[in-house]
């Protein structure tokens, strides 16, 4: 589809499919021939991609790399991290250590990220030394620094909540009095999964939080609390060539500030709002020069408008459903994009796919995870289980389950609710060893 056209949507029967935007989505593209030739994996001749961080996102990217014949080298803080357990090419070290980053980058075709915490000054040095850093540091900064992101998006005319920098508690009081309470205080850098976010009702509640965080050296900002109907996520990928592709916009359900469930596509979303969200995500990717998969976390306001919440320039929890429910997963697409290959078809393969996060129980169950897996397999043969090899800790993301819906329609609320119930039941079983419907796995 040529540049500028709205993202394509085709409907066949009850399955809505979404076509890849195959043309340039911007003018800042480079020729694919400009791709640097670089050392390849010695045995296969296929590319080596370095991912900084050894978490589950790197682990699942490794899975996609295997299918493409590539090697995913990971820079991991320790040998037990999820991706370090599985990659044959592990560099141990910290993402804040320039020498470790250099070691990890050596001879690799592209360097990319499993999290947002690598200092951009290190990345600038790597780029100057010839490393193919994707997304480039000048784009990544907008996923690292929420204040920079807000300023940039506002300048681009993208919808963002009112916001202000906080240099002392009085800034929050002033903002709250002007824009109304409650307000949201955020650490400008470093927070994720609900960490570094505080919702406060008044100046008294804000004061100790601000004092403590500023004392600890954090930079803070404050924003208006958006009155929302729900949260959405628009996932896209963009290549250096300028190709862009969008997956169907999904609904994300948060619990305790953390993603718990994803419904793909978002039910009850008008074609107009879906197209607006996809177009916005493609535009942000293009204007910021993003390379790789990117999630644009959105609020759907009670008035039915969109507001950008966060940007994540990497595979993202809201895209885990694509592993089983889309023709190209976000992990494969990320590799394609950072290597400047043509992007894959992002169509959904079912009317709905629901992802349930396996979030660590308050206390790890007595029953081993292996036994839980057996029981789940026995009860739900269609549940697609993804475990990350992580220790069980309360609320920690230790895996997810995808349920790909059978025949049905996204417009049928009962059908969607049934698929969702199964995904949540399966995920809860894996984390808690309890069936939410009271089923007894050893019963007659
Ligand atoms: N991650 C990165 N940003 C947000 C998330 N969820 C993933 C990355 C990272 C891992 O979560 O894969 O390495 C860290 O998880 P944990 O449970 O060790 O904090």
Image: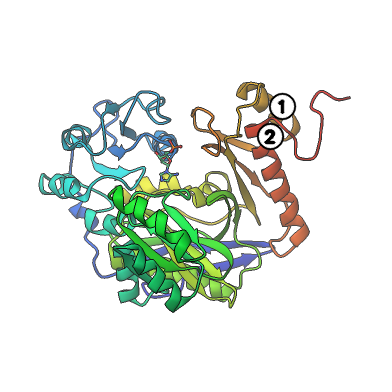
The residue sitting at 58% across, 76% down in the picture is 304
| Relative vertical location of residue 362 with respect to residue 424 in this rendering, above or below | above
Q: Is residue 311 visible?
A: no
Numbered circle sitting on residue 315: none
Q: Is residue 135 visible?
A: yes
Quadrant hosting ligand 1: top left
Question: Do residues under tags 2 and 1 come within 8 Å of each other at their CB atoms?
Answer: yes
Q: Secondary structure at mark 2?
A: helix
The residue sitting at 36% across, 42% down in the picture is 114
Q: Tell me where residue 38 appears, x and y as whole percent.
A: 18, 40
Tell me how far mark 2 sits from mark 1, CA to CA. Answer: 9 Å
Q: Residues within 10 Å of mark 1 (few under 14, many from 20)?
A: some
Nearer to the camera, 81 or 195 = 195
Nearer to the camera, 36 or 229 = 229
Disc nearer the start of the sequence (2/1): 1
Horizontal side of residue 351 vs 125, given as left or right:
right
Horizontal side of residue 210 vs 122, given as left or right:
right
Residue tagged 1 = 375
Q: Which of the 4 quarters of the picture holds residue 92?
A: top left
Q: Tell me where residue 20 appears, x and y as whole percent.
A: 45, 61
Q: Which of the 4 quarters of the picture holds residue 163?
A: bottom left
Residue tagged 2 = 429
Nearer the camera: disc 2 or disc 1: 2
Q: Tell me where residue 64 appears, x and y as whole percent.
A: 43, 39
């Amino acid at each position: 589809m040529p540049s500028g056209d709205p993202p394509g949507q085709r409907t066949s029967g009850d399955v809505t499919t979404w076509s890849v935007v195959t043309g340039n989505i911007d003018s800042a593209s480079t020729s694919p021939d400009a791709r640097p030739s670089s050392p390849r994996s010695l045995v296969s001749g296929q590319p080596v991609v370095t991912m900084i961080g050894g978490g589950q996102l790197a682990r699942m990217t490794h899975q996609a790399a295997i299918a493409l014949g590539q090697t995913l080298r990971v820079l991991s803080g320790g040998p037990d991290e999820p991706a370090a357990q599985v990659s044959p090419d592990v560099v141990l070290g910290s993402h804040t250590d320039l020498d470790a980053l250099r070691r990890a980058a050596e001879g690799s075709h592209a360097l990319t990220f499993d999290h947002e915490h690598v200092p951009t000054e290190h990345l600038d040095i790597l780029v100057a030394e010839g490393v193919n850093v994707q997304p480039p540091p000048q784009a990544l900064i907008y996923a690292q620094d929420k204040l920079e992101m807000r300023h940039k998006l506002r300048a681009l005319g993208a919808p963002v909540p009112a916001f202000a920098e906080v240099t002392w508690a009085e800034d929050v009081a002033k903002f709250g009095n002007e824009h109304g309470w409650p307000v949201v205080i955020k650490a400008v850098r470093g927070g994720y999964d609900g960490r570094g976010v505080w919702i406060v009702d008044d100046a008294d509640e804000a004061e100790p939080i601000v004092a403590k965080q500023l004392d600890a050296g954090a930079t803070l900002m404050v924003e208006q609390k958006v009155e929302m109907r729900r949260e959405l996520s628009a996932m896209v990928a963009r290549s250096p060539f300028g190709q862009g592709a969008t997956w169907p916009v999904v609904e994300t359900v948060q619990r305790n500030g953390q993603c718990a469930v994803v419904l793909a596509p978002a039910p009850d979303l008008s074609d107009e709002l879906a197209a607006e969200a996809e177009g916005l995500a493609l535009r942000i990717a293009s204007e910021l020069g993003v390379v790789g998969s990117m999630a644009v976390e959105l609020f759907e306001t009670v008035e039915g408008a969109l507001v950008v919440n966060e940007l994540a320039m990497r595979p993202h929890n809201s895209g885990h459903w694509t592993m089983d429910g889309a023709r190209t997963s976000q992990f494969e697409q990320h590799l394609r994009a950072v290597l400047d290959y043509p992007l894959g078809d992002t169509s959904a393969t079912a009317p709905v796919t629901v992802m349930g996060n396996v979030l660590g129980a308050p206390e790890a169950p007595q029953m081993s995870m292996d036994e839980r897996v057996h029981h789940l397999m026995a009860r739900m043969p269609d549940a697609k289980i993804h475990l990350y090899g992580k220790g069980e800790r309360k609320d920690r993301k230790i895996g997810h389950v995808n349920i790909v819906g059978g025949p049905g329609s996204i417009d049928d609320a009962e059908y969607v609710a049934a698929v969702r119930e199964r995904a949540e039941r399966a995920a809860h079983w894996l984390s808690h060893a309890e069936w939410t419907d009271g089923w007894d796995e050893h019963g007659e």
